Image (spheres, helix red, strand yellow):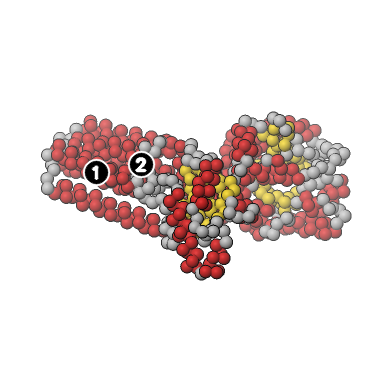
Amino acid sequence: MRGHNTGPFPYPRALLVRAMALMWTAGGAMVLVCTVLPHPPGMVVGTVVTTGVLALVVGAAAFAAGARFPSWVFPATCFVGTWMITVTVVAGGGGTASVSFSLLYVWVVIHSLLFFSRPVALFQCAAAAAAYGVAHQWLGTLGAVEPLLLAGTLAVAAAVVAGLEHARDAASVDPLTRTSNRRGLDHVLEREMERARTDGWPLTVGMLDIDHFKQVNDRHGHEAGDRLLTQAVECWQGRLRPGDSISRFGGDEFVVVLPRTTPSEGRQIIERLRADLPGAVTFSAGVAAWLPHDSMSMLLSRVDAVLYEAKRGGRDRTVVNGDDDSAVRALSAAIRGGEFVVFHQPTVSLRTGRITGFEALVRWQHPERGLLPPSEFIPLAEDSGLIVQLGEFVLDRACRDARGWLDRFPDEPAKVSVNVSGRQLDDPGFTDAVACALRDSGLPARLLTIEVTETVLAASLPSWAERLWDVRRLGVQLAMDDFGTGYSSLNQLRRLPFGVIKVDRSFVEDLPDSPEAAALVDAMVGIGRALGLAVVAEGVETAEQLAYVRGAGCDEAQGFLLGRPAPADVAARLLERQSLPAAAHAPGDHSGDRAAAHAG
């Protein structure tokens, strides 16, 4: 476990930055206030004002840019602050003012004990004690009581902080293996992700699962299983480098966090851990790199996914997420290089026959392979976590295209719908990304629809529901895509603020010949009507299907019969003509576009 005394900052950097900024700002403000209140005649007001103003400047800089400061800046700034306090104490001229300023040393001590590693914290405490002695020796006010009072104050502060640290560590430690538990892992990952984001170093995470551990418990008892876990951890801890950490994730699963490590280097470390296990014990492992848009849960879900692959592939092996690193790099470079384009497929009103909007679908304009459908790259984007980046691009491009249509055809505004994946909903910045796309494009929120597939909703987390509600509060419409394909449709319609349901093409394709399909479509339309929801039929490819869904009461329809996905300028021409494309459009494979439902 990484405790208080092992790393430069035991708390997340963001908390350290806020505490540092608050300490400097509050200290500077209090010093300046003392200059306007009645003060001893011996106070050098100009010096006191200067130190107070400098403290405010440092505090403001920390608030504005502290997250980008190199790690060494924080203890260095604290050390400088100690001697600025000393200057202020001396400038106070002795008496009550200097005593009051001396209280700021306690802030330094508590801040150091809380936020710095033990050696650094002890150095800062010694520096504060020495500075206190220098200041009061200079003033001639250092008697027998003052050093005793200072020593007692520092001892009490150290004892209180040590007690807090012990309580924090106890709540974050697995009692059997003495490694971090899941709560401790959250602290470690949060800190290392912030550091990787700030410093630009790679971060790799591995998940280890001891093979056939249940059989050990069943055959030899839980005590034997516990001994195996503790022996394994002892072996692994001896192999990990300074700065690496291991946490018990649950049962026989462990997570290793490897800062400044690439996935290939992480695999090598995992293999060294494998060689150290006692006897015939083996483990399966999954390895993944942290990506800039990863949340903690996204990163751990990718690691867990490749661990499952390792176990499914025969155990006693390591699988690295995105093992084809070149493909992941190519996909990332393509996103940065603008190789992706957004096509739009029209949605048509079945009452008027006019286009009411478009669904945004992404394509990869590959420089060598030509135009690639979503099925060629969406799975890799999902596995690598690049789906968040790609989804933000699609959202931004779709909103800009829709704004262009609105400028040209203000009397008949066309909506645009964008599909999002579970990984995007898992991103804490999702709502901000939607708001930013609307703001940057100038598109009214009422013209944007966010589509979520029912299969995604079936695995939803509480945070996803909160984000969907937040998006709805922006004025954006929500649509349940692929309605009828999962088991949770009605429950989700009750819990979440959907305004549209889209009947999955698997029901439409059997119309009108299948009585079962017809009955199901009729039932879905009835549900939509009862709940006041608009109903859209997907995958309409024949005139007979179109006639049926119109007669069943669907509000709108979408499919190759009504229009194929096309670039934004072609969509604009369709709006200009405002007539249905000829039914001569040949039916085609819609699977590529359904895969785009995960491209966000």
Foreground mark, 1 or 2, reads 1
**Horizontal relation, residue 131 to residue 268: left or right:** left
Q: Quadrant of residue 383?
A: top right
Frontmost residue, 328 versus 354: 328
Say whether disc 1 or disc 2 marks the residue closer to the N-terminus: 2
**Horizontal relation, residue 162 to residue 204: left or right:** left
Per the image, the residue denoted by label 2 is 20
Who's the residue at 26% across and 39% down the image?
A: 82
Q: CA distance from mark 1 to mark 2?
A: 19 Å
Who's the residue at 70% across and 57% down the image?
A: 486
Who's the residue at 46% across and 38% down the image?
A: 198
**Horizontal relation, residue 186 to residue 478: left or right:** left
Task: Inspect the image, locate mark 2, and give the three-letter code of the amino acid beneath it.
Answer: Met
- Locate residue 257, reporting x and y percent: 48, 48
Q: Secondary structure at mark 1?
A: helix
Per the image, the residue denoted by label 1 is 126
- Locate residue 458, reporting x and y percent: 65, 56
Dot 2 crowding, Cα within 10 Å, few <14, some 14–19, many 20+: many
- Locate residue 214, reporting x and y percent: 56, 64
Task: Inspect the image, locate mark 1, and give the three-letter code of the amino acid beneath it.
Answer: Ala
